[in-house]
Image: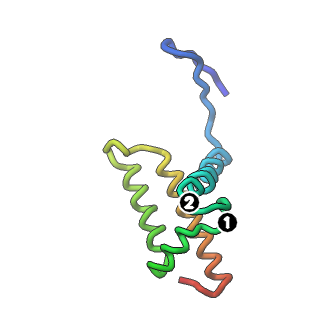
Amino acid sequence: MTSTRNENGPHEQHVEPTFDDFVRHVRGQLDDAAVAKNYSTNGADGTNTLYTAVQQMTGGHHHGCAEIVYKVNRFLSAGQRGNNVEDIVKVASWAFLIWRHWHLDQAHGTEK
């Protein structure tokens, strides 16, 4: 880690991002944000009631896939919400939900 002094403020810390950092952000999105929005009460590995409900309504993983496309498009946009790396964390979160529910469907013989 290197420290640089900005003439207008205190020391800034520059840290090389790691895969563990990324996973920590994704887990935070799946745990904290999902609980705050009442999608899940038991974390990333628990039941995500919203994903399950939408999956039942659409007959598959269509909504999760569409969210990924939407978040990538928004990240690439030049608008006010563009270039927000939090959208990439959300893409990974949606990818995890698709992956997890696909495996749950396989295990329960309810593949979509």
In percent of width and height, residue 82 lies at 37, 45
Helix, strand or loop at mark 1: loop
Judging from the image, the colouring scheme is rainbow
Tell me: 101 left or right of 61. Answer: right
Q: Residue at x 61, y 51 (%)?
A: 32
User: Compared to 2, does 70 lie above or below?
Assistant: below
Asked if the residue at tag 2 contacts the one at tag 1, i.e. Cβ–Cβ closer than 8 Å, the answer is no
Residue holding disc 1:
46
In percent of width and height, residue 88 lies at 50, 51
State the residue in front, 110 or 69. Answer: 110
User: Compared to 41, does 63 lie above or below?
Assistant: below
In percent of width and height, residue 51 lies at 53, 69
The number of numbered discs placed on residues in the rendered structure image is: 2
Q: Residue furthest top?
A: 7
Indicate the amino acid at tag 1. Answer: Gly
- Counting residues from the start of the chain, the first of labels 1 and 2 encountered is 2
Q: Quadrant of residue 73?
A: bottom left
Tell me: 5 left or right of 79. Answer: right
Q: Nearer the viewer, mark 1 or mark 2?
A: 2
Residue holding disc 2:
38
CA distance separating discs 1 and 2: 12 Å
Q: How crowded is the residue under tag 1: few (<14 C-alpha within 10 Å), some, or many (20+)? A: few
Q: Residue at x 37, y 45 (%)?
A: 81
Indicate the amino acid at tag 2. Answer: Asn
Q: Residue at x 49, y 78 (%)?
A: 60
Helix, strand or loop at mark 2: loop
Label placed on residue 66:
none
